[in-house]
Amino acid sequence: MSTSDLEQNRKTERDSDLDKHGDAKKPSSYPSRMGNALTKRLLTWGVETRGILPVPPEERTDTQFFKIFFLWFSTNFNILSFSAGTLGPAAFGLSTRDSCLVILFFNMLCCLPPAYLATWGPKLGLRQMVQARFSFGYFGVIIPCILNLIGMFGFSVLNSILGGQTLASVTDGNLSWTVGIVVIAIISLFLSFCGYTVLNWYERLAWIPVLVSFLVALGLGGEHLSTTVPTEPATAVAVFSFASVIAGFVITYSSLASDFTSYYRPDVSSLKIALYAYLGYLLPIASLQCLGAAVASSAPLVPAWEAGWNLGSQSNVGGLLNAMLSPVGNFGKFLTVLLSLSVTGNIAATFYSISFNIQLFIPTLVVVPRYVFSLVSIAIVLPLSIVGSHRFYDTLENFLALIGYWASDYIAVVLVEHFVFRPRNTLYSSTMGYDLTQWNNPRLLPTGIPAVTAGVLTFGLVIPCMSQALFVGPIGEKTGDIGFEVASVLCAVLYLWLRTVEVWWRGVI
């Protein structure tokens, strides 16, 4: 059969599938089909119910494009970013200067992929992992969805633990970490339950009290930051291992970048969206990570800071921040409470994206309103946070390093698919080479075999390049952790070759 015949058959299949899958053509009718009085009532209150169904062009009407900057700024302007920065001196023995250089360089590099992928939301109206079906396939995308869910639940657990610790630190032992974690999680649940409108409104304002709190802390403790503990000269092993932690912190946003831009007008400049998103990632993450590195380098020389940090024989960032703010008494405790609440924006945004990944993981759940999965999220995160609350630092270091590997594979696959294979399909140029009627049809999407195979094979070289507390490979032992760099390059090469074979074999993209 010729290529033209194959393409004609695919077009015929696609047209018939539209009749069988009318919801793909008219996603806006989805909530009304629920026949659920609660859902209808929540709609009148502004609660978003749409899950993974594409947002049609007529519903992509939001022109407040600056919201994506504030969403990512508030999401990352929190004590978790501060904590990640402390790992440079505390876990890898780097000086403030070396830690900050690693933080700046690798954040400038690693903020690029999620910022670019955010531009696809207005053009396609697809959530990020739904778009990944055009490279990983209908069933193959389940694997990155599982890994993405692990990553998002992991970040939610880390934020819940950190917020709960910080909230408990101001009560002099009268409030347990468990109660603090529950308070943080419930606030986050409310925000994610409401969805797009409420979440964006909150993120537009949430950064302000956090900025005030950090400025006061910096003003009170700034004089101590000029004196740091002596460190050994930086080694390649320490630099690249810390860099893998920094990379894991930000590149994982690539798998949810367009979840928050799919309601924007399709004619918005991609450069504008990319710039807003890039600055929303870079400014809060780099600034607070550098501050965390500076404080961690000085804390052992300030008795009050060291006592707060090692409260209860555990590394306690909340105790450290409370100690920094303690000179202003009750006002300092109030600011510490505000800092504890800074993680709620991150958790809420993560719960929001978790909803879409659950529906992709189990496609039959597409009929369930999005907000239901916020309840599922908190049911999973709460017990994990409570159980893991006393091993925060070990969990943070290991988790951030490991999570970056799969994200590198994901980025390599979707970008190679986009730049190498999709431009050939000029029939759908208005949607960047993607036929959006195929989004929910396994027969019309790629098989996903090249993407999954490339990702799996990549780890044959990634594992020897690891250098983490859990495992040190023979290459990583000499070079430091270069796993995420190797994953990006090797996966791109493998996917390019395997996908080319698939296109040749099938005769169509």
Image (cartoon, rainbow, N blue to C red):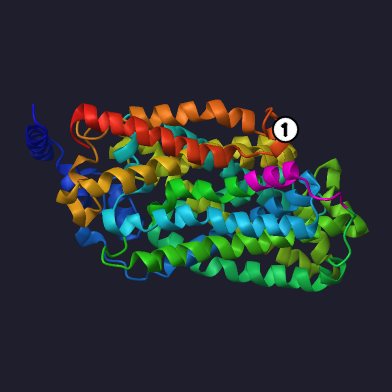
Residue located beneath label 1 in the image: 477
Local crowd size for mark 1, using a 10 Å CA cut-off: few (<14), some (14–19), many (≥20)? some
Residue at the (43%, 67%) spot, across then down? 67
- How many numbered circles does the render carry? 1
Side (left or right) of 456 relative to 175: left
Residue 243 within the magenta-colored segment of the rendering = yes
Above or below, 192 relative to 200: above
Residue 266 left/right relative to 298 = left
Up-down relation of residue 401 to residue 212 (above or below): above
Magenta stretch holds residue 351: no
Q: Residue at x 50, y 30 (%)?
A: 458
- Prevalent SS, magenta region: helix
What's drawn in magenta, residue-wise? 231-244
Residue 431: image x %, image y %?
Answer: 23, 54
Residue 386 x %, y %? 66, 38
In the rendered image, is residue 366 in sight?
Answer: yes
User: Looking at the picture, which amino acid does disc 1 mark?
Assistant: Glu
Residue sitting at 46 percent across and 49 percent down? 254
Where is residue 176, by image quadrant?
A: top right
Can you say whether 253 is above or below 208 in the image? above
Looking at the rendered structure, the secondary structure element under dot 1 is: helix
Name the spot of residue 261 as percent of width and height, x first: 37, 58
Quarter holding the C terminus is: top left
Q: Is residue 299 left or right of residue 24?
A: right
Closer to the camera, 496 or 221?
A: 496
* Residue in front for this viewpoint, 376 or 248: 248
- Left or right: where 157 falls relative to 379: right
- In this rendered view, identify the residue nearer to me: 480 or 161: 480
- The quarter of the rendered structure image containing the N terminus is top left
